[in-house]
Amino acid sequence: MAAVWLYDAQIQKHHEDIFFLDDRSSVHVDFLWHPEANNSVKERLLAWIREPAAKPDVVVIGAATWSIKLHGGSSETLQQYRANLTAIAVHLEKLADPGAVYWVLQDPVNEEMLSESRKMITNQQLDLYNAAAMGVFNSSKYNSRPRVKLLAASRQAALETIGQSDDGLHLPESTRNVGAMVLMNSFCNKVLRPIDGSCCQTLSPLNFSQKLSACFFLGSAVVFMVLHLLGSNRHRRPVPSDVESLEEKKPATAAVPLGPKAPFQALCKMGLIMGYFYLCDRADVFMKEQKFYTNSTFFIPLIYILVLGVFYSENSKETKLLNREQTDEWKGWMQLVILIYHISGASAFIPVYMHVRVLVAAYLFQTGYGHFSFFWLKGDFGLYRVCQVLFRLNFLVLVLCVVMDRPYQFYYFVPLVTFWFVIIYSTMAMWPQILQKRTNGSSMWHLGVLAKLLGLLLFICCFAFSQSFFERVFSMWPISELFELNGSIHEWWFRWKLDRFAVIHGMVFAFIYLVLQKRQVLSEAKGELLFPAKISNLLLFLSVVSFITYSIWASRCKTKRECNEMHPYISVVQILAFILIRNIPGYARSIYSSFFSWFGKISLELFICQYHIWLAADTKGILVLIPGNPSVNIMVSTFIFVCVAHEISLITNDLAQVVIPKDSMALLRRLGIIGVCSFLVLLLSRGNQLTPGA
């Protein structure tokens, strides 16, 4: 990169050209001494234009103080200055395509400290010259959007720091550093595009998929408006189902089938929401700020939501272990803790990091528990059930992949739970299909289930202890399109390996619990202990001890890598300890927090939406809707974030009824169309990757 400074500043070597070359980074910087904006500057610019090979990538130029000093601040000199800038502006415009040209506005002076030979350099004079420069370069005569950028960063900083100047003219080093940092951000961020750099980045042009999605949502809005004008179709939303168990609550009255307007209304809302996502985290509309972890930013909100959760306690409708209300509550408080963990940047604190890792493992534990229980009890292995679960898990993420131009693996949790659902389904659906009703005749079928679980364990170990085998399998096209991130499957390997046993732990727990429940070993009546008193007290004591032991171990961990190596083997102990503490006492099973339960019903949407409309810069920063007031900003952004997540949950439920029909033939036709379209998209994506220069 070649850069050139042309202006009247004075640095270590006075009034002469200075040249700098760094071969290691291919940086060539020239300081060219031109104290006035006159014909000598014009000739230099013309020479660069005539010889493109010598043209610099960046030109930083400025002049005024020497013109004021040499000519006593006369009005004639100001007029000549304006005329000279007008003459060279057209040449600077040419240099700015495709390079970068910055005109440095003149910094203020401390008039009281100026020497006698500089007394004519007043702030009033500098303002006049700066106004002349802004008038010339902000003019639309050469371009509707001026290509010559005005650099005023050091001037703004100097308004506060010029009093620290040694001679009243030259700025202190700290102020010069500010100008240099802004200059580097302005040029480098748009080239390097750092994920945590929200300053000075140009917007990436919309790709074909983003344009197509925008047209699709606009088309849906037009169809909705037409249907709305033709007549109103009243409908009641179908009752949402849990993607882990897909058990639907029966409404008091039968729900009216969705009318033709409902799916277009849902798509219209989704389009508006996606527009908000894009404005928050792709357009240069809202600011972002860095995370900064302190214990108070994590633990104070944690205590606050704990108090709210306890305050909204209600009697549960059933007292079975891990009933629907309790699992929703469990997912809800875990999700709120994870949200606080992300926005506070608490991953920097290893003890908190390790406890949150247990929460993620608990989500996967519930995945294994919920799906195993459903298949074991109901034996529904139909295509409709599979498509419903996959649609509900992946709809939002697939839309975001298109709108936000992010790979599927970027939203790592959804690929993780989708992968494990497919594995659970395959394990339970493969021959022989062993269900609870089949085991009523013979307990030998239980051995068949254990054999399947053992086979699944061997499958996991085979992948976990052979990274090369894992990489070969998931690097094969087309599945590599689902699991690669930035051309590598390292992130997928890390996420999968970290909680590789959590799902099978949940399946084994579900199997043991359902067998014990069937044999009436457990006491699940209201107010009763789950086990006999002595056993219950012993299990509660061991559970509390395991919690304390784990916290002590996590606080003594020196590195994340060291802790992560142990995590897959010990996380289940904490999960089981929580389940026992929450369910052994009869009074604990008979109540639940409706506050946490409400959040648990939209936990998946909350986890995904946080990436772009609560956090920012793809989770690296924090979205700033209201600058200058962090407390109000977090309240407003959180309110919008939660409302959006809730609405997306309802939209997903509406569209699932339309996209996934119960009629088998209609479903197969739609899957065929989706499969062909997906294959064509993958081929197009692969072709773009293989095209040179693409």
Image: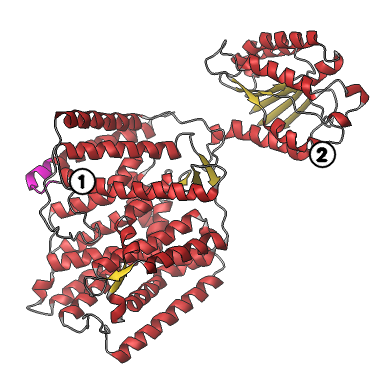
The kind of secondary structure element at disc 2 is: helix
Residue located at (57% from left, 54% from top): 292
> Quick one: 58 or 265, which is closer to the camera?
265
When asked about the image quadrant of residue 87, the answer is top right
Amino acid on which the number 1 mark rests in the picture: Asp
For marks 2 and 1, the one nearer the N-term is: 2
Q: Which mark is residue 482?
A: none
Residue identified by numbered label 1: 654
Residue 250 lies in magenta, yes or no? no
342 to 281, vertically: above or below: below
Q: How many residues crowd mark 1 within 10 Å: few (<14), some (14–19), many (20+)?
A: many
Residue 287 in the image: above or below residue 6:
below
Mark 2, Cα crowd under 10 Å, few <14 / some 14-19 / many 20+, is some
Give the x, y percent position of residue 126: 76, 22
Q: Which residue is rendered at x = 43% and y = 59% of the image?
A: 338
Q: Residue at x 42, y 45 (%)?
A: 613
In this view, the residue in front, 375 or 143, is 143
- Secondary structure of residue under mark 1: helix
Which span is picked out in magenta? 661-669
- Name the quarter where the C terminus is drawn: top left
Residue 35 quadrant: top right
* Residue 401 appears in the figure: yes
Magenta-drawn stretch contains 666: yes
At label 2, the amino acid type is Gln
Measure the alpha-carbon separation of dots 2 and 1.
64 Å
For mark 2, what is the residue?
164
Q: Is residue 148 above or below residue 346?
A: above
In the rendered image, the quadrant that contains the N terminus is top right
The kind of secondary structure the magenta stretch mainly shows is helix
Image-based side of 635 in relation to 430, left or right:
right
Q: Is residue 587 found left or right of 307 in the rendered image?
A: left
State how many labels appear. 2
